[in-house]
Structures are given as structure tokens and as C-alpha cells.
Image: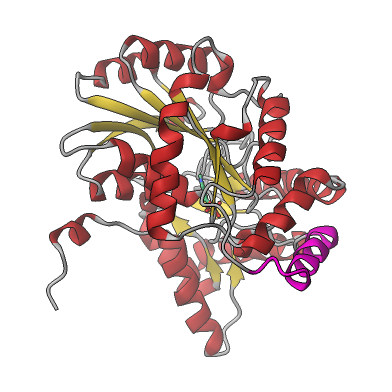
Amino acid sequence: MKLAQRMSRLGTETAFEVLAKAQRLEAQGRSVIHLEIGEPDFETPANIVGAGQEAIQNGFTSYNPSPGYQDLRTVIAGDISKTRGIEAKSDNVVVTPGGKPIMFFVIMALIENGDEVLYPNPGFPIYESMIEFCGGTAVPMQLHGDKDFNIDIEEVRNQITSRTKLMIINSPNNPCGSIIGEKELEALSILAKENDILVLSDEIYIRFLYEGAHQSITKFPGMVDRTVILDGFSKTYSMTGWRIGYGLLPDSLVEPISRLVTNSVSCTASFTQKAALEALTGPQDDSTRMVKEFRKRRDIVVTGLNNIPGIKCAIPKGAFYTFPNVEGTGLSSSDFANGLLEHAGVAVLSGESFGKFGKGYVRISFANSTRNLEEALARIENFLKAGS
Ligand SMILES: Cc1ncc(COP(=O)(O)O)c(C=O)c1O
């Protein structure tokens, strides 16, 4: 069968491929520690599971409005207003099956052939994939590993052209765990306004912050009207498989994005939305406890990695990933990741899965138990010793 030409421009998320490979090894009886996939190792909190079960029993099993139930949109708008210090309106919230569709739909709705889109690199691989799939030109904004994975504003200024239509930012960032400082965020907001660029601000890791308070680009004057905030429930409430996320959209994008929802998935599962309502309105203790636990694990992993010869690891300020430089081991990112999985049973991702500026790095998720993380550190050390 001959696939449509556009399929040659569609990338993927390597995490799912490495997970499948690791599971094949496990099926052969090998022990594998999973540090590849970006999901909390905690169960969905019991109150949320209960609300989902109750919703199914109460008949919330049919279609619902494409942008989501009004009560959930209202609660989401309230939460965004509180966490970002802005006035978010429920009419501007569109609920989708995960935060990922917001990326796809926004890029699909805006980008014409040849339009340029700035995106973080290293960054979530789906940005580049979606930009190219939709006919856009992906322009990588480098996160500099030697500068704490910061963006260089002058570099970005020079990358902007009359075709630049969209800028994607992600703070806290996957895979680097870095955050965009207030000064840089303000500078980016000025560039967006001066050049009439829409911003897609992926804030899915907003609650996973280990230093300071979350800053959203929407806090700067005029930015609510030219920003899409992407957020969701997958990470904060350990709900990856429930599939629910949302966008806060400028007025003019609400109807087109809702129409894309109608055309693709119709709506987000009804009972999932009821569970999400409980997630935001119920007790937050489980989520708070999880973030506290992640901070402890971060410290264990960063200290452990920096004690291994050849590895240099910056301290992530947010999310649940470390992005150590492994050039000192003499191995390329992919040789490191492949060798570690095959010979030592630790699944991590090559930095190049996150774009060309990830060369020399690997991504190690610390969403795993302390025991497994300590075992993984020992296996990494032994793997490198055996190879030298
Ligand atoms: C940066 C980033 N944005 C968005 C998502 C999408 O998550 P979901 O579709 O589960 O809400 C992920 C998931 O890994 C992510 O890492």
C-alpha cells in the first residue's frame, strides 16, 4: 500500500518504542528498570478512581459536547486563573483526550505550507513531528546545555522572520527539567507581540516544580489573547491512561479547535471528565505528596549520576527528568542508551530523540521507586566500568 506523502513527515515518540523493546526483553526473562517513559509511577488517587467508577454507574457513558462538559470547563478556568494569576474564562477552555491533541489541533488550525514555527530543542518530539506533518518549517530554539538549558533571546530574535507564525515553549521542560526564567519569558512575550506570533505554552509539568513559583507567559500584558495554555491531568494526577487534557485558547481559536475535536474524536470520555472534576475539586494531598517524593528522588539521581565518571548532570528545577551529558563516557547518546538496555537492563532514552541539540545527552526519568533508582545507578556504573 502506498502511504500518503505526508506520512513521511510524521515522526514519533521514541519512549513508546523503547518501552516495547524493554518489554520484549522482559518477556525473555530479563530484568529491566524502566526509566524511559514519562509517567508517574503512582496510582491514580482513590477519590478520582471512585468518581470515575460512580460516573460510569450513573450513566456518564455517552457522547458529550465537543469542548467538554460546562462544569468541568468552569472548574478548569478557575484553576488556571488561580495558578497563573490571570482571568481565564470557561468559554475559552476546550477539553481533549490528553494534552497532546491540543498541540496537534493548534498546529493544524494555524500552520500553512512554509509557515515557520519556533520550538524548543531538545524538546518534546511531537512538536517537530506535528509542525512538519502540517507542512510547516520547524525552527529549533536551542536550549543550551552549558547554560542550564536556557534559551538565548538574541538567538531567537535572529530566527524570527515574516513567516514565523507560532512559538512553542515548554516550562518546566521535557526532557531537560529546566524552566524559563521570568526575564526570558518577558523577552519572549515582547518578541511575540512585536512580530505578531501566537505562543503555545505547554505547561503540563507546572505542578512539578522544585524551586520557586510557576511563571506563565500569560502574566505579561496582552499575552492571554495570543497564548494557548496546554495543560492536563496525566502527570499531576497520575491519569495518563484516562486520556484527558485541555487548552485555554484565545477567543478566535475556540470554535475551530472544537470543530477539529468534532471531526476527529467527537469528545473526551464522559466518565473521565467526571473523574477530572473530582481531581481538581477534591483533596490535593496525593498530588502534593507525589511531588515531594519526586524531589527526593531527583536529588538521589542527580547525586548518583554525578558520582559516575564521565557523566555530568545538571539539577532539574522541574518535571521528572534528568538530562545528563554522557560525552565523557566516550559513548554516543544512542550507544549509551542501547548498550545500557541490552547489557545492563536499564531503559533510558537517547538525547537525540528530543532533537539534534540533544546530542551527547540521555534522558533519565526519575518517576520510579527509590529502590529501583538506586539499583539503576549501580547498573549504570557497572555497565560503564565493564566497557572501559
Ligand atoms: C511536554 C509534554 N507535553 C504534553 C504531554 C502530553 O501528555 P498527555 O497527552 O498525556 O496529556 C507530554 C507527555 O509526555 C509532555 O511530556
- Residue at the farthest bottom position: 28
Question: Image quadrant of residue 157?
Answer: top left
Which residue is at a point 61% across and 49% down the rendered structure image? 305
Nearest to the observer: residue 327 or residue 365? 365
Q: Is the stretch drawn in magenta largely helix, strand or loop?
A: helix
User: Residue 152 in the image: x percent, y percent?
Assistant: 39, 19
- Position of 183 relative to 362 (above/below): above
Residue 223 visible in the snapshot: yes
Which residue is at a point 21% across and 32% down the rendered structure image? 115
Nearest to the observer: residue 329 or residue 364? 364
Which residue is at a point 55% across and 54% down the rendered structure image? 364
Question: Image quadrant of residue 191?
Answer: top left
User: Residue 347 in the image: x percent, y percent?
Assistant: 52, 66
**Apparent side of residue 46 relative to residue 186 in the rendered image (left or right):** right
Nearest to the observer: residue 174 or residue 357? 174
User: Residue 228 in the image: x percent, y percent?
Assistant: 48, 31
Residue 351 visible in the snapshot: no
- Position of 56 relative to 258 (above/below): below
Please provide the residue range marked out in magenta: 45-61
- Position of 351 relative to 63 (above/below): above
**Apparent side of residue 309 relative to residue 71 in the rendered image (left or right):** left
Image quadrant for the N terminus? bottom left
Q: Is residue 179 within the magenta segment?
A: no
Question: Image quadrant of residue 198?
Answer: top left
**Apparent side of residue 286 relative to residue 337 in the rendered image (left or right):** right
